[in-house]
Image: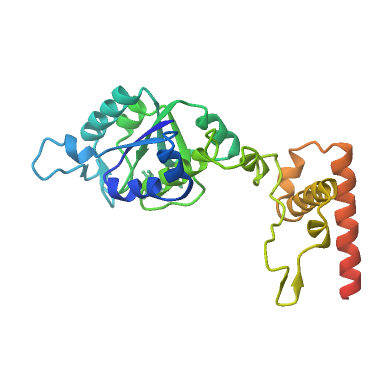
Amino acid sequence: MRIDIVTIFPDLVSAVGEFGVARIARERSILELHLWNPRDYCEDSYRRVDDRPYGGGPGMVMQAPPLAAAIREARRASGGRVIGLSPQGAPLNQAAVERLAGEPALVLLAGRYEGIDQRLLDAEVDEEVSIGDYVVAGGELPAMVLIEALVRHLPGVLGNEESALADSFGSGLLDWPHYTRPEEFEGHKVPETLLGGNHESIRRWRLKQALGQTWLRRPDLLEKRKLNKEESLLLEEFKAQLELKGQESS
Ligand code: SAM
């Protein structure tokens, strides 16, 4: 996958390709990152990309001409759809990540200041994406969040192809709890089932925990997901065991 990022802070965004799964993806030529700085497309020697808002008010607004030039150059090189990072965009979720990961190329546009001249957004941006209902200072970190989320879905990046599917949201549930050595930590033991080596028992235990954690923490996800017979039974078992534990500790 090719991802082009239009940003006035290319050094900040390039860091995402230097670590973890994105670095592995780049080393395996599964991911290509390209950076475009709108300041390189300014006509004035101060390389200004912002100006005061028409109508007055606080802050500055990113100007359309240098952004348009940078985006057009990126689009010409990559052919990708242009995704604007914006608190006003559609909230990013797993379905959107999977859909975008299927694109061969994307151009990500990171805003700064009070935002971007609306005429640029109307003319050049295909879709706007938000990383949540809060505002950060710029679109660089949201772009990096999106890149890390996308990369996990590119074939050949994660060691185990099922890994992204088993993660929270992959199957419409939260992930199950994980444990590693030591077997006992400050008096707390690893659940017995995980030490037994019985693959079917381990599968059922994990599914039960995933259902239970989703029921406890994100019941809204369960409302959207139809449970099969096994899942319904496991969730009932989880609830019964939780109640029993509550009675024992009271
Ligand atoms: N005035 C804008 C508003 O209230 O919608 C906020 C502008 S914000 C300070 C500057 C830039 O940060 C935005 O243009 C966008 O690129 C990015 N940004 C901020 N919050 C974001 C979010 N939740 N999701 C995606 N991008 C965000």
Residue 230, by quadrant, is top right
The residue depicted at 85 percent of the width and 55 percent of the height is 238
Residue positioned 81% across, 47% down in the render: 199
Q: Position of residue 247 (x, y in %)?
A: 91, 70
Q: Which is nearer the eye, 125 or 211? A: 211
Q: Is residue 6 left or right of residue 214?
A: left
198 vs 8, left or right, is: right
Direction left: furthest residue: 45
Residue 194 at x, y percent in the picture = 78, 57
Location of the C terminus by quadrant is bottom right
Decide which of 186, 38 is in the foreground and name it: 186
Residue occupying the point 65% across, 39% down = 162
Left or right: where 59 falls relative to 86 = left
Residue 139 is situated, as x and y percent measured from the top left of the image, at 38, 45
Q: Position of residue 79 (x, y in %)?
A: 36, 22
Q: Nearer the viewer, residue 53 or 227?
A: 227
Which image quadrant for residue 84? top left
**Colour pattern of the rendering:** rainbow
Q: Quadrant of the N terminus?
A: top left
Q: Is residue 125 above or below residue 147?
A: above
Looking at the image, can residue 138 be seen? yes
Seen in the picture, residue 246 relative to 4 is either above or below; the reply is below
